[in-house]
Image (tube, rainbow, N blue to C red):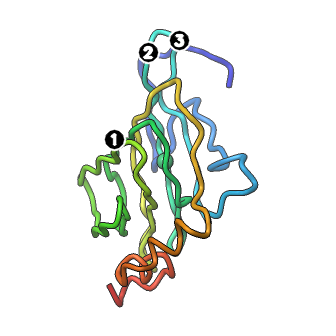
Amino acid sequence: MAHERKTIRKARDYRWDGVDVLPYKEDARALYRAITRQVLFTDPNLHAELRYFEIAPGGFSTLERHEHMHAVLILRGRGHCLVGTRISAVELRDLVTVPPLTWHQFRAGVDDALGFLCMVDAVRDKPQLPSPDDLAQLNEHPQVAAFLAGAMEKV
Ligand code: MN
């Protein structure tokens, strides 16, 4: 992305002036569905980046973990998130903290998009994907298994 510093960038329907709507990830290994990414703030003088992700109804982010943290503010719609082995319903203005090396995934509702701001370190490690053993451990928790299967009405 060409770097151009603007003081004010107007928003319209969750799109911002001069901000490209990007694919969620380039990593072909990652399992995800119906999600876009906009990088709102990135600057060599900042040690953080602020991104806006939007998951279409029925979509979900990658199940992953990494050393860096996420600070998430829900801006649109509703859904559920997994943080560690805990599942929470999330809606407008909720804050979600994802600690280091903690499995996490966001899922939009069946009929609702889920949009959120996510703050991260500008320099950060690559996400790790779960091994078969990791998945087996997560699936030992019935609520987590239901969440991972996309069966939120049963949680
Ligand atoms: Mn992550």
Q: Is mark 3 on a helix, strand or loop?
A: loop
Residue sitting nearer the eye, 101 or 122: 101
Give the amino acid type for the residue marked by disc 3 in the picture.
Answer: Pro
Residue at (60% x, 39% y) in the render: 126
x and y percentages locating residue 82 in the rendered image: 37, 64
For the C terminus, the quadrant is bottom left
Relative horizontal placement of residue 35, taking residue 83 as reference (left or right): right
Q: Is mark 2 on a helix, strand or loop?
A: loop
Mark 3 or mark 1: which comes first in sequence?
Answer: 3
Residue at (46% x, 38% y) in the render: 67
Residue contact between numbered discs 1 and 2, judged by CB atoms under 8 Å: no
Label disc, if present, on residue 44 of the rendered structure: 3
Residue at (53% x, 24% y) in the render: 123
Res 110 quadrant in image:
bottom left
x and y percentages locating residue 4 in the rendered image: 59, 15
Residue contact between numbered discs 3 and 2, judged by CB atoms under 8 Å: yes
> CB at mark 1 closer than 8 A to ligand 1?
no
Residue at (43% x, 46% y) in the render: 101
Separation (CA) of disc 1 from disc 2: 16 Å
Res 1 quadrant in image:
top right
Give the amino acid type for the residue marked by disc 2 in the picture.
Answer: Leu
Separation (CA) of disc 3 from disc 1: 20 Å
Q: Mark 2 points at which residue?
A: 46
